[in-house]
């Protein structure tokens, strides 16, 4: 059977930004936008996009203080600037341009997320994405885990004409695998296209799929222009996607198999039932998420 092009449901402009702490000025494409909602990008539950922002120099490190998570993985991708992380499992790390950190909160972790010290002092351009990848019910309480994925550890693809290169974080592209361990099938790539270069992707029809334009402008499926900071959201009708660069561009491509389970989110927790949310708060207030200095 011939594969067909995936239908483009919409090309979304970034919703108005909100602040996460004083360091992350983010546009939430989902779940706040009702077209996608709680399930429309499953297993991805949340995408906060920190569009380019010129951060003024600051002696105080901007960021968000100690807070818990349970039931999800937080995946942070840096495009400009540097982000530091500490968690109650004893893991810490700093990621910069092209790097990713993949933190599994699982049964519970405390963490804090800041602009890295030297970056804070100097200030500069900042651009990042944070995704929350929901965990399947059977893995919600898995032990916390931290995967630091520096750019040089990612799977690397380069097209024959050298106009398309991809950093594969998770899943597989053109037979090249990304290093991230995941709990359900997830594809996550950063794709760089030079002007007039093109890329094609193929994901199973039922998978939820989207492309965020980090930089530049592309033509999708020969029909739809998508510009910097816009998110293209696909339907389930076909498998293939074609992207052609109108100018030099960077695309964040994400696709995954939907979990098809109840989703009950509250604050930093994403569980399957209200009772599990209540238990998460009880465990958090009982100190069962460990300790992390502010
Ligand atoms: Mn967090």
Image (tube, rainbow, N blue to C red):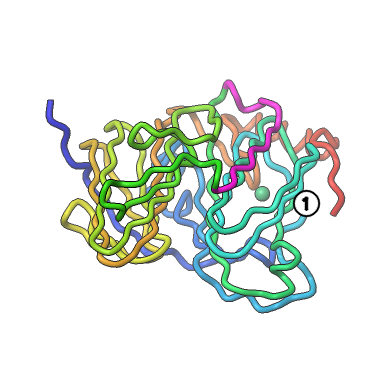
- Name the residue: 53% across, 39% down: 133
The one nearer the camera, 134 or 53, is 53
Task: Please tell me whether residue 142 belongs to the stretch shown in magenta.
Answer: yes
Could you classify mark 1 by the number of other residues whose Cα lies within 10 Å: few (under 14), some (14-19), or many (20 or more)? some
Where 220 falls versus 236 (above or below)?
below
The one nearer the camera, 202 or 271, is 202
Location of residue 264 (image quadrant): top right
Relative image position of residue 283 (x, y in whole percent)? 78, 33
Relative image position of residue 186 (x, y in whole percent)? 45, 34
- Name the residue: 82% across, 33% down: 288
The one nearer the camera, 287 or 100, is 100
Q: In this view, does 147 lie to the left or right of 194?
A: right
Relative image position of residue 162 (x, y in whole percent)? 31, 52
Considering the image in quadrants, where does the C terminus appear? bottom right
- Name the residue: 36% across, 31% down: 175
Residues drawn in magenta = 138-151
Residue beneath label 1, please?
66
Considering the image in quadrants, where does the N terminus appear? top left
């Amino acid at each position: 059977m011939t594969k067909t092009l995936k239908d483009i449901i919409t090309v979304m402009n970034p919703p108005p930004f909100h602040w996460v702490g004083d360091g992350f000025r983010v546009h939430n494409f989902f779940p706040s936008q009702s077209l996608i909602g709680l399930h429309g990008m499953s297993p991805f539950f949340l995408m906060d996009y920190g569009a380019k922002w010129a951060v003024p120099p600051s002696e105080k490190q901007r960021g968000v203080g100690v807070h818990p998570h349970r039931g999800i993985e937080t995946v942070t991708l840096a495009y400009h600037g540097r982000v530091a992380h500490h968690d109650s499992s004893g893991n810490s790390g700093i990621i910069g341009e092209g790097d990713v950190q993949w933190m599994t909160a699982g049964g519970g972790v405390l963490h804090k997320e800041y602009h890295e010290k030297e970056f804070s002092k100097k200030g500069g351009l900042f651009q990042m994405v944070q995704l929350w990848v929901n965990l399947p019910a059977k893995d919600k309480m898995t032990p916390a885990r931290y995967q630091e994925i520096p750019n040089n550890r990612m799977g690397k693809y380069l097209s024959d004409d050298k106009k398309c290169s991809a950093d594969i974080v998770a899943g597989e592209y053109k037979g090249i695998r990304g290093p991230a361990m995941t709990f359900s099938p997830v594809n996550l790539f950063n794709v760089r296209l030079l002007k007039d270069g093109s890329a094609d992707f193929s994901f199973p029809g039922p998978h939820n799929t989207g492309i965020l334009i980090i930089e530049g402008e592309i033509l999708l499926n020969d029909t739809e222009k998508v510009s910097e900071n816009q998110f293209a959201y696909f339907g389930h009708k076909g498998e293939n996607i074609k992207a052609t660069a109108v100018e030099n561009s960077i695309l964040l491509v994400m696709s995954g198999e939907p979990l098809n389970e109840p989703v009950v989110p509250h604050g930093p927790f994403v569980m399957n039932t209200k009772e599990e949310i209540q238990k998460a708060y009880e465990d958090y207030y009982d100190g069962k998420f460990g300790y992390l200095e502010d």
